[in-house]
Image: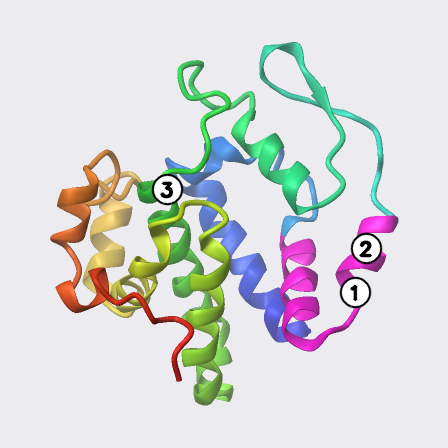
């Protein structure tokens, strides 16, 4: 659990600074990293740590864009709060996660995975975990799983990270491009792989 939380805390440190993702995060004060780590732990192990945490959450509504108020009590309601974050531009309020945003999310997540030391401690875990993320990122955007392996490769290249930081922590190679352009950025074998991440 401690290793997972180190990874998720590192992820949120990056997300808070990211030009794209931070707009989805209504408040930095919530224990995002802890909750995310507990959700992962529960999914991977069958524990109930995330359910227990969820039962103890504050049930006061939070303020969203347009003066709306919303109770955040689980993953789905947290997604709604992200879509309607008051930090988003008005023309994006309510819009669900797009492919480019999902790719940014995965790149930062895998960068945090590398920095956390989990890869060194358990190399055999990594392939499974990339598939795990690919499976669940489909909730954000149906086409996103095909980009998980590329996002993991991106996180291995220090030059990619330096370029990203130099660009004001905006992934200019990803944000705003079309589906066709995105598909040209990854191997065609991955674009058309209808079996992964569920094959062995």
Q: Residue 184, image x and y in percent? A: 11, 53
Find disc 1 in the rendering and name its residue. Answer: 49
Q: Position of residue 188 (x, y in %)?
A: 14, 63
Q: How busy is the neighbourhood of tag 3: few (under 14 within 10 Å), some, or many (20 plus)?
A: many
Q: Find the distance from the CA under tag 1 to the CA under tag 3.
A: 28 Å
Looking at the image, do the residues carrying marks 1 and 3 touch, with CB atoms under 8 Å apart? Answer: no
Q: Which residues are magenta?
A: 33-55
Does 143 appear above or below 49?
Answer: above
What residue is pinned by disc 2?
Answer: 53
Residue 41 drawn in magenta:
yes
**N-terminal of the two: label 1 or label 3?**
1
Question: Which residue in the protein does label 3 denote?
Answer: 101
> Is residue 165 visible in this depiction of the protein?
yes
Quadrant for the N terminus, please.
Answer: bottom right
Q: Residue at x 67, y 15 (%)?
A: 68
Percent coordinates x, y for residue 16 in the rendering: 49, 42
- Quick check: 184 above or below 128? above
Q: Secondary structure at mark 3?
A: helix
The residue most toward the front is 194
**Taking the image as drawn, is residue 26 in sight?**
no
């Amino acid at each position: 659990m401690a290793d997972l939380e180190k990874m998720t805390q590192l992820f949120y440190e990056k997300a808070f600074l990211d030009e794209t993702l931070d707009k989805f995060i209504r408040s930095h004060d919530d224990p995002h990293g802890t909750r995310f780590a507990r959700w992962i732990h529960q999914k991977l192990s069958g524990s109930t740590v995330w359910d227990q945490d969820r039962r103890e959450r504050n049930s006061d509504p939070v303020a969203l864009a347009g003066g709306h108020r919303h109770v955040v009590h689980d993953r789905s309601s947290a997604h709604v709060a992200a879509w309607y974050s008051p930090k988003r531009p008005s023309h994006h309020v309510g819009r669900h996660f797009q492919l480019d945003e999902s790719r940014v999310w995965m790149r930062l997540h895998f960068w945090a995975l590398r920095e956390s030391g989990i890869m060194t401690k358990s190399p055999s875990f990594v392939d499974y975990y990339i598939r795990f993320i690919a499976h669940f990122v489909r909730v954000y955007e149906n086409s996103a799983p095909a980009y998980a392996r590329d996002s993991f490769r991106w996180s291995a290249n220090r030059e990619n990270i330096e370029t990203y930081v130099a660009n004001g922590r905006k992934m200019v190679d990803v944000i705003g491009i079309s589906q066709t352009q995105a598909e040209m950025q990854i191997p065609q074998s991955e674009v058309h792989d209808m079996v992964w991440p569920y094959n062995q």
